[in-house]
Image (cartoon, rainbow, N blue to C red):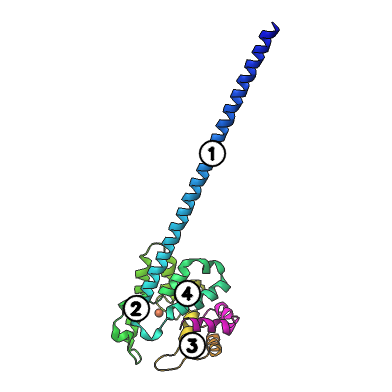
């Protein structure tokens, strides 16, 4: 009897051991499966990120190609769009960092004059003052630019900057005569950056002024042509920082 009981106990022991071993191997298999899932997810995530970066790079390349096409016609402005974008982003970062982080802000700054592709040479390159009918033609570049850019999906906010980049704080700008905060903030910042660049670069008919002089001229137009808050940000920026942007993108 005792021997029989011992055998049963042994058999039971072995069965439990086998069951435990099987459970262990099953949970090992589950663990390996989970690791495989995690590694697959990591690969998918990495591939997604690479694709997003590629897409962004191709956007930047496209925007730069368009910008260069415009600047190629306007020989004296040199790297105007690049400088304005750099001044503009610097000011934007100090006023509203989230706006500076939005790539569309830089795209809008770079593409502001893309509509000039449709302006005839005799108007675009006329050395004398424009007649009123020619001024009307020249001013169309903002709406033409907006029409070009707003057709590109995901560039809606950049298109707003293109359209509003010649609006003035006091409402006397074009094309819509917007005033004050009706003008998108990025466009208000842009117009300060644009004027800063125009004043500080040499043109065939005049030499550019120094950075402190340009800031002084712009300050005088705070509250009329420009948003005072943007002008305050410009005035708070050390001249050397602005000069290094000017010198890097000559
Ligand atoms: Fe313009």
Image quadrant for the N terminus? top right
In-front residue for pair 90/25: 25
The residues tagged by marks 2 and 4 sit, at their Cα atoms, a distance apart of 18 Å
For mark 4, give the secondary structure. Answer: helix
For mark 3, give the secondary structure. Answer: helix
In this picture, is 6 found above or below 243?
A: above
The residues tagged by marks 2 and 1 sit, at their Cα atoms, a distance apart of 61 Å
Say if mark 2 contacts mark 3, CB within 8 Å: no
Residue at horizontal 35 percent and vertical 77 percent from the top: 70
Which residue in the structure is indicated by mark 4?
Answer: 187
Which residue in the structure is indicated by mark 1?
Answer: 32
Q: Residues within 10 Å of mark 3 (few under 14, many from 20)?
A: some
Of circles 2 and 1, which is in front? Answer: 1
Q: Is residue 155 visible?
A: no
Image quadrant for the C terminus? bottom left
Q: Is residue 54 left or right of residue 217?
A: left
Residue at horizontal 34 percent and vertical 78 percent from the top: 116
Which residue in the structure is indicated by mark 2?
Answer: 116
- Upstream in the sequence, badge 2 or badge 4? 2
Instruction: Find out if the beta carbon at label 2 lies less than 8 Å from the nearest ligand 1 atom.
Output: yes
For mark 1, give the secondary structure. Answer: helix
Which portion, as a residue range, is magenta?
225-250
Q: Is residue 21 visible?
A: yes
**Residue 211 is drawn in which quadrant?**
bottom right
Of circles 3 and 4, which is in front? Answer: 3
Of circles 3 and 1, which is in front? Answer: 1
Q: Is residue 205 left or right of residue 237?
A: left
């Amino acid at each position: 009897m005792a021997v029989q009981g011992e055998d049963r106990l042994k058999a039971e022991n072995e069965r439990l051991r086998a069951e435990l071993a099987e459970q262990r191997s099953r949970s090992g298999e589950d663990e390996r499966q989970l690791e495989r899932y995690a590694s697959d997810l990591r690969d998918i995530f990495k591939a997604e990120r690479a694709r997003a970066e590629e897409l962004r790079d191709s956007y930047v390349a496209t925007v730069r190609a368009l910008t260069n096409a415009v600047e190629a016609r306007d020989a004296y402005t040199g790297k105007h769009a690049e400088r304005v974008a750099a001044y503009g982003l610097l000011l934007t970062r100090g006023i509203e960092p989230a706006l500076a982080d939005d790539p569309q802000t830089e795209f809008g700054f770079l593409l502001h004059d893309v509509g000039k592709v449709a302006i005839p040479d005799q108007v675009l390159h006329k050395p004398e003052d424009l007649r009123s009918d020619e001024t009307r033609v020249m001013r169309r570049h903002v709406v033409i630019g907006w029409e070009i850019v707003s057709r590109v999906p995901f560039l809606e906010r950049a298109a707003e900057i293109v359209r509003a980049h010649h609006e003035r704080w006091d409402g006397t700008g074009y094309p819509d005569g917007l005033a004050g905060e009706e003008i998108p903030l990025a466009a208000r910042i842009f117009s300060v950056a644009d004027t800063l660049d125009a004043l500080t670069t040499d043109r065939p008919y005049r030499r550019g002024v120094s950075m402190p002089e340009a800031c002084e001229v712009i300050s005088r137009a705070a509250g009329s042509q420009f948003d005072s808050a943007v002008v305050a940000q410009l005035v708070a920026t050390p001249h050397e920082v602005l000069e290094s942007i000017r010198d890097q993108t000559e």
